[in-house]
Image: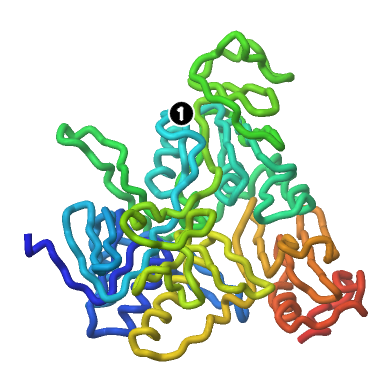
């Protein structure tokens, strides 16, 4: 079996944004050393159209590409398509599912996170995390009349907005939609969009998209792959048609402050149809009983209830310090508690003393930043050079799109950790923009911008320089005052 043993200087696990960014960083810094990127999926995620919008805000697209694209760009980088079976950290050896043994000098674990499913192995419950599950969703949606979506994060928000031709029942555990990102006011600003006809789609985006061949068994039947691919890109629903079987364009029923009590495949006598629902609605493949007492029949259920760090394969036999959420704890040089093992992206949890304006959130932007910084930290350790915590960890920042609005999050945008000691300023123009500023003792601590406000750079500067704004009071958001002139 000697041929199955490899010696590689740098090994990165995970073909998502954090892993690919880290592997690229190492390959370009150590051109004469070998770098291996292990990925369970045949495609890797790469950052394209990267734009530095301001000092910390960055905007980019995520593209899936065949791994050969990376190997062509970096001659010293080898992509190995296999999942990790186990890690022997003391011996600096990684065993793969397909029987290879890889010994490394430095390892960076970027294995991402996996969806928290409502229930395992129920054929009527679908989690959406990677390209394969998104395609499966599209296929099942095409014949669906009604689906139940459970969850309140980014994927649930995008899904509910994008689905057409199918009734959607959206079960949200909170008092408002999207509370990871928004306050109740912003949620109210966005809700009317769910009932409107969507703007005509621009011409389809011209990016190359690659799909994976479904895995087949010996007889050529397709089998569900057990390997998880990496997470979806921020615009995963572009270019796949999310249409159901109904004539309705958009019908969303929101059920707040509830979860799923039970899921059953037939209507039993205790099922009472919710008020306003036709009792003669026929039979459904699956029934969902919500904790608010209502029961809905539907074609299938989408579980979009968040993710858990995918650290499992690395734990047995090793001594990793873990955070309460199951992430590998990393210090301010992205090192785990095992020597020469680093981690970045969704699989890790930061344990350094965070800047008062930053928090970890498992989002694309942070996966890229952490992967890039982890590559720099590994290089610094190898070259025995000092390295400072990167500036991107000074201020939390994220740009995304929800319900076709541009959304910018800065700092403590939801007053995270500020307790009672803060005030909010709001400016809202229905259907146009929603601006919220979080102030504490006269200083701007965070902001949420929905729409084309063009205020992100000004607000970023105000948050970073912590200028006392008490004198401006309510006028800070007065639309007749050009705030940018004040603070440039």
Residue 462 figure quarter: bottom right
Left or right, residue 62 beside residue 215: right
Q: Quadrant of residue 357?
A: bottom right
As displayed, is residue 161 above or below residue 279? below
Q: Residue 422, position in %: x, y?
A: 83, 66
Quadrant into which the N terminus falls: bottom left
- In the picture, measured across the screen, residue 24 lies left or right of residue 426, that is left
Circle count: 1
Is 473 in front, or is 322?
A: 322
Q: Nearer the viewer, residue 433 or 461?
A: 461
Residue 86 picture quarter: bottom left
Q: Residue at x 24, y 68 (%)?
A: 91
- Quadrant in the picture for the C terminus: bottom right
Q: Looking at the picture, tell me which residue is in the foreground, 129 or 236.
A: 129
Residue 56 versus residue 208 in the image, above or below = below
Q: How is the image coloured?
A: rainbow
Residue to which mark 1 is pinned: 124
- Say which residue appears at 73% left-offset and 73% top-offset: 455
Please state the horizontal and vertical placement of residue 72, each as a whole percent of the image: 25, 73
Badge 1 marks a residue whose secondary structure is loop
Q: Is residue 328 visible?
A: yes
387, 404: nearer the viewer = 387
Image point (74%, 84%), residue name: 465
Residue 214 to residue 19: above or below: above
Camera sees residue 254? no
**x%, y% of residue 329?**
48, 65
- x 60%, y 49%: residue: 153
């Amino acid at each position: 079996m000697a041929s199955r043993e490899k010696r590689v200087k740098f090994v990165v696990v995970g073909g998502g944004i954090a892993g690919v960014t880290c592997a690229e960083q190492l390959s370009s810094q150590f051109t004469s050393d070998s770098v291996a990127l292990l990925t369970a999926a045949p495609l890797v995620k790469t950052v394209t159209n990267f734009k530095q919008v301001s000092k910390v805000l960055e905007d980019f697209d995520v593209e899936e590409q065949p791994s050969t694209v990376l190997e062509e760009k970096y001659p010293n980088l080898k992509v190995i398509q296999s999942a990790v079976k186990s890690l022997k950290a003391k011996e600096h050896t990684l065993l793969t599912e397909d029987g290879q043994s890889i010994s490394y000098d430095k390892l960076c674990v970027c294995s991402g996170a996996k969806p928290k499913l409502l229930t395992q192995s129920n054929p009527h419950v679908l989690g959406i995390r990677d390209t394969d599950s998104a395609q499966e969703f599209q296929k099942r949606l095409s014949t669906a009349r009604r689906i139940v979506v459970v969850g309140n994060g980014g994927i649930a928000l995008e899904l509910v907005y994008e689905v057409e031709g199918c009734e959607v029942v959206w079960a949200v555990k909170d008092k408002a939609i999207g509370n990871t990102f928004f306050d109740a006011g912003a949620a109210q600003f966005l809700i009317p969009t769910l009932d409107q006809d969507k703007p005509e789609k621009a011409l389809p985006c011209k990016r190359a998209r690659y799909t994976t061949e479904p895995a087949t068994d010996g007889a050529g039947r397709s089998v569900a792959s057990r390997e998880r691919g990496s997470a979806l890109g921020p615009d995963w629903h572009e270019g796949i048609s999310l249409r159901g079987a109904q004539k309705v364009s958009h019908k969303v029923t929101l059920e707040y402050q509830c979860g799923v009590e039970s899921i059953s495949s037939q209507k039993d006598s205790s099922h009472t149809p919710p008020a306003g629902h036709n009792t003669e609605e026929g039979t459904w493949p699956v029934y969902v009983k919500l904790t608010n007492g209502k029961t809905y029949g539907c074609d299938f259920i989408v579980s979009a209830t968040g993710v858990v760090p995918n650290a499992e394969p690395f734990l047995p036999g090793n001594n990793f310090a873990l955070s309460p959420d199951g992430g590998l704890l990393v210090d301010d040089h992205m090192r785990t508690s095992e020597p020469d093992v680093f981690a970045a992206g969704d699989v890790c949890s930061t344990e350094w003393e965070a800047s008062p304006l930053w928090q970890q959130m498992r989002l694309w932007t942070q996966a890229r930043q952490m992967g890039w910084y982890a590559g720099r930290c590994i290089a610094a350790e190898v070259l025995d050079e000092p390295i400072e915590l990167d500036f991107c960890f000074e201020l939390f920042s994220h740009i995304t799109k929800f319900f076709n609005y541009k959304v910018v999050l800065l700092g403590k945008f939801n007053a995270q950790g500020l307790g009672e000691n803060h005030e909010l300023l709001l400016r809202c123009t229905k259907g146009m923009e929603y601006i919220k500023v979080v102030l504490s003792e006269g200083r701007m601590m965070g902001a949420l911008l929905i729409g084309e406000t063009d205020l992100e750079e000004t607000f970023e500067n105000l948050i970073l320089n912590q200028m006392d704004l008490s004198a401006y009071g309510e006028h800070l958001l007065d639309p007749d005052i050009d705030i940018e002139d004040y603070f440039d």
